[in-house]
Image (cartoon, grey):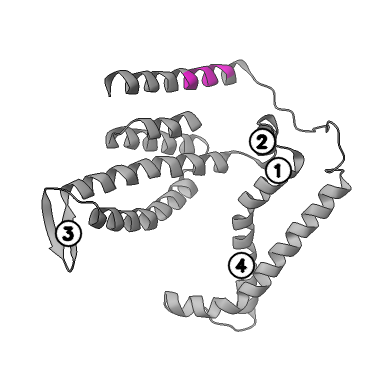
Amino acid sequence: MFSLCLSALIVNNILFYLLILLLFLGLASAASIFKEYSKTLFKTLAVLGLFMFLMISITTKGTDLITSFFVFDVYQEGIDRACLLIARISVLCGGFLLFFKITSSAELSFILTNLGFGPVGVFVVKSAIQMVPEMKKQMNVIIEAQKSRGMDFSGNAFTRFRKMIPTMLPLILSSFYSTEEKSLVLEARGISIPGKKARLYQPLKTKKDIVIYSLMLLYLLIILVWRLCYA
């Protein structure tokens, strides 16, 4: 996964990026998360891509002028650069999103521990990653509770946002309380006690895993050599 994302930083080719995105979609389909993954990915890229396209296309100078409006000039070079950067960021976002979709909490803890993170560091990273999904789930609970009391959340986006402002305070407070409860649980389990910790989750590397790791390293090496010699 990370080899494919790193290769997007090495190669400057939109077709190459599209092939990697298709590969990510294929992996998501194999993991039975295609609908959820593609929906989240396209929503993220639609907002981020539109903003980046507008900003880059009107701020990049060139020689081939396409159109002008107000004080902004749009050049072909700006559009080409915007498309390239959007495609590259799409690969990076798609790779990291797929990684967190198919990686369990126990697997993530094991990976971070092998990378040299201490128990506190693993807890901080996991809490930061899980904060947004947990807040979203808690927000849905609060909204359903308010609806049961007769509050109406219909209307345009601005109206719904204005009605959701009062729910922000209990949402933020509940997030702090949840983090504090997790900290107390970890302290009760001896997270701050020095020494080697026993782990209940110990995944074993199979021959298939070793083959995949080797192929990914070989792929990244080939990309690096190609970039240095021919690009």
The label nearer to you, 1 versus 2, is 1
Q: Disc 2 to disc 4, how far (Cα)?
A: 29 Å
Which contiguous range is marked in magenta? 210-217
Element under label 4?
Answer: helix
Residue most extreme to the bottom: 150
Label disc, if present, on residue 112 of the rendered structure: 2
Is disc 1 in contact with disc 2, using a CB cutoff of under 8 Å?
A: yes
Q: Residues within 10 Å of mark 3 (few under 14, many from 20)?
A: some
Label 4: which residue?
A: 139
Label 3: which residue?
A: 73
Horizontal relation, residue 114 to residue 160: left or right? right
In the rendering, at what x and y percent does residue 67 appear? 12, 59
Residue drawn where x is 52% and y is 17% of the image? 214
Query: What's under tag 1, amino acid-wise?
Result: Gly
Is disc 1 in contact with disc 4, using a CB cutoff of under 8 Å?
A: no
Q: How crowded is mark 2: few (under 14 residues within 10 Å), some or many (20 or more)?
A: some
